[in-house]
Image (tube, coloured by chain):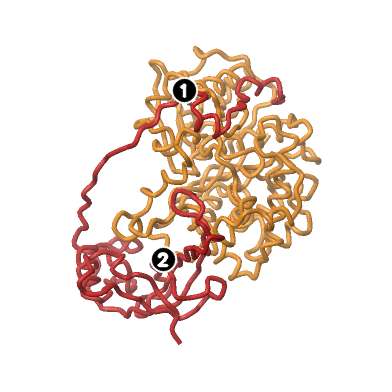
Amino acid sequence: MRRVAIVGAGLTKFVRYAQETPKELAYEGVRMALDSCEMKLSDIECVVHGTAPDAFDGVHMKGEYLSDASGAYRKPYMRHYVGGGTGVLSPIHGWFHVASGMFDTCLVVTEEKMSCAYPHPAGAFLTIFDHTTEQPLYPTLIWIFAIEMNRFMTTHGYRKEDIALVAVKNKKNAIDHPSAQLAAEITVEDVLNSEVMAWPVNRLDISPTSDGAAAIILAAEHVARRVTEKPIWIDGVGWALDTAYWCTRDLYYPDYVEVAARQAYKMSGIREPSKEIHVAEPYDPFTYKELHHIEGLQLCKRGESVQMLVDGVTQRTGNLPCCPSGGALGVGNPIAATGLMKIIEIFLQLREEAGKRQVPGKPTCGLAQAWGDLMQVGTVVVMRS
Amino acid sequence: MEITEKDVAHTTSKLRFDDIKKGKVLSVKWEPKLNYAWDNGPALGRYLAELKNGRIIAKKCDKCHRTMLPPRMFCELCWRPTGRWVYVRDTGIVNTWVVSYVDWKAGRLNIEGGVRPFTPAIIEIDGTSKGMGILHLLDEVDPWKISRGMKVKAVWKPVKERIGAITDIKYFKPVK
């Protein structure tokens, strides 16, 4: 397999109600990515697109709808979708195209416009559940994540007030991110006193509904060296799905994230992730998810993620900064674009171009992860400078 | 490269939900009217038929020996056809739960007006293999007194009202 580098990136602002159409958002992300490395669309040999449920936009076959905006006119084009895990599957999908030798360049685009679904996109999720055994009970995503958070808490004895620190940290980190939708200085009390959505989940435990787009450009080594002095290499990839019988898994631990992470670590030669990974962007659509994923990613032992958080290890200045971007909780969560926003954050961190968000210590190895489908997919990418 | 305020200025929106609601911006509203008739297949078909009888039926895998609920024609772990049917009890324990103040569309329940929060839970049914939970609702219990491992029992709809659906069980309630 050939080495594959990220050479450019583009990211729109994340907002609640974008005036732009989904196509215009995608176009903007792509334009920024091409400009960032002074490439033209004619330099791009193939395009992959990641975007989550068609039901958000009310446009069936959203991949085709977004193809023009993604610069895919008369180019090999593929759309992929694994729910919230999509944004980190996107670079993996593009990586295949280039690593295989089939193409020298690949444009990876992700877009999500959640605000079209009216009055709230949460309703669009009813049909992800089993139509016979679950839909008649009218489940919603907030329930099932609250169900998982509760299992996580009761298994380890975690307290809500400790988990709330994730929101405090990430929303604060987001203050330094120009794309951020929900950057704020808040306290643990603010989180605990915010509206109860589905106990143990309060409003400030949840990432917002967002619109936005992100794009990156992948290149084979000989092209990457020509395009930039600072290519960032995709060094390990992994993804895995657990069973869709989600009620029969023990939700306290994301096995599928562990499987995906081990695959990526093996490929990247990582033996001690907590020491060898310098900066991480675990997926944080809910406060507890960052901790849940840190455990699944083997960045700490099971049951120790809260201590790590309380000790400040995951702060931007800590030993293992997690979500220095501000994450889904702070920057926003336009589903597929969020995962790629995390990839872009690691790209910038490893190039030491993250501005005010730069983590200290000249990081050379970072990781981004996302999660989704019916709480069953883990997608992991390890990157090196 | 560094992403700056200037780069992202193109997509800054000052639109709010109210603007859409009041018709200040042009928007199109569309109500999807799609009807689906889902076949249940042999496994869930029998499961539903037995629910109508007031019984819960599971299916066993002869290789991993799990007694599985909902019943399925193939074991997803062993990747082989499942074996015999077994009746399990209509009691179980609470694996994990939630006290929900929102409905499926994220609409707020009128809690202050006296509406009881939804209390969905994963319930491990007695007689199935460890950890075999199903999603259902809890009721006849103070939402704040639900606990992990709490013993519960199905409350069935009257025989005449049952239609062969998961909702033939109204909810689960605590038992001693």
Mark drawn on residue B26? 1
| Chain of the residue displaying label 2 | A
Colour orange belongs to chain = A
Mark 2 surroundings within 10 Å by alpha-carbon count, few (fewer than 14), some (14 through 19), many (20 or more):
many
> Which quarter shows the N terminus of chain B?
top right
SS label for mark 2:
helix
SS for callout 1: loop
Could you say which quadrant of the image residue B78 lies in? bottom left
Position of the C terminus of chain B by quadrant: bottom left
The numbered dot on residue A248 is 2
Q: Is residue A321 left or right of residue B79?
A: right
Identify the amino acid type marked 2.
Thr
Point 67% across, 41% down: residue:
A330
Give the image location of residue B11, x and y in percent: 60, 23
Question: What's the mark number on residue B144?
Answer: none
Q: How many marks?
A: 2
Residue in view at x 33 percent, y 55 percent:
A130
Q: Position of residue A118 (x, y in %)?
A: 45, 37
Residue A295 percent location from the top left of the image: 62, 58
Instruction: Report the front residue among A109 and A207.
Output: A207
